[in-house]
Amino acid sequence: MFISLNISLIAWSSFDLTFSALSHYWFAFDTNNIEHQIINTLRMPRVLGCALIGANLAVAGVLMQGLTRNPLASPSVLAINSGAALMIVLTSFGILTLPLPTVVAGALGSTLSGLLVIYLGGFFENRPHPVKLVLAGIAVNALLLGLTRATIILADDQAYSIQSWLIGSVSNLNWDSISLLAPVSLFALLLSWDWLIN
């Protein structure tokens, strides 16, 4: 089913491709063929990117549920999403100057907010309680979301661009994005697999 869905995503769009064009792309790639170029430069990076992003989100959800012992937990419960969003907004608007790409700044923000929640939730205590961790996460998440929205409102001229960035899109994914995303994702998935087994 997963393979069929990916083939459908590659083939069906505003510019439909035949199954023969897909098979020729894999086994007889032609740089002068417009269909092959569309697959190679637009559709294939998006499909691979979506697969990697989906795998990352699924594993993140499983880890959060295991950590909080709550089947409804998600990265937003530990303020990971809101921490990343706030850091991206602050660096994009120039309020906070960091010599880092936007993606790395977001990762830094999510790490810091996650560590803050873990500390406030008493995770390092002798007998940590999952409910305390969840409550700390909800409180920090609300605070960071409020700060993010206030910053966006105050910077009205750039609000639309940053809002579209925070919502997310795979339309700009290319092979450079995949070369950055794939190794980080595989490394993180291997670490997560080791943690889940143990």
Image (cartoon, rainbow, N blue to C red):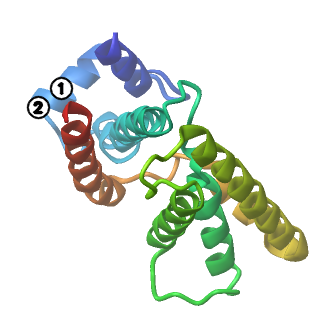
In the rendered image, residue 94, in percent from the top left (x then y), is placed at: 67, 86
Q: Is residue 67 above or below residue 103?
A: above
Is there a contact, CB below 8 Å, between mark 2 and mark 1?
yes
Residue extending farthest top: 1
Amino acid at circle 1: His
**Which residue lies most toward the left here?**
27
Q: Disc 2 to disc 1, how far (Cα)?
A: 5 Å
Disc 2 residue type (three-letter): Ala
Quarter occupied by residue 151: bottom right
**For this rendering, which residue is in front, 195 or 57?**
195
Count residues near mark 2 (Cα–Cα under 10 Å), then give few for <14, some for 14-19, many for 20+.
Answer: few
Q: Which residue is mark 2?
A: 28
Where on the picture, by quarter, is residue 72? top right
Q: Is residue 106 left or right of residue 24?
A: right
Q: Is residue 147 above or below residue 126?
A: below
Quadrant where the C terminus is found in the figure? top left
| Residue at the spot 34% in from the left edge and 20% down from the top edge | 7
Query: Which percent across, then down, holds residue 189?
Result: 26, 42
**Disc 1 crowd, CA 10 A, few/some/many (<14, 14-19, 20+):** few
Q: Which mark is residue 24?
A: 1
Using the image as rendered, state which of residue 73 and residue 42 is in the foreground: 73
Classify 118 as above or below 127.
below
Q: Position of residue 185 (x, y in %)?
A: 29, 49
Q: Secondary structure at mark 1?
A: helix
For the question of whether residue 77 can be seen, the reply is: no
Q: Which mark is residue 108?
A: none
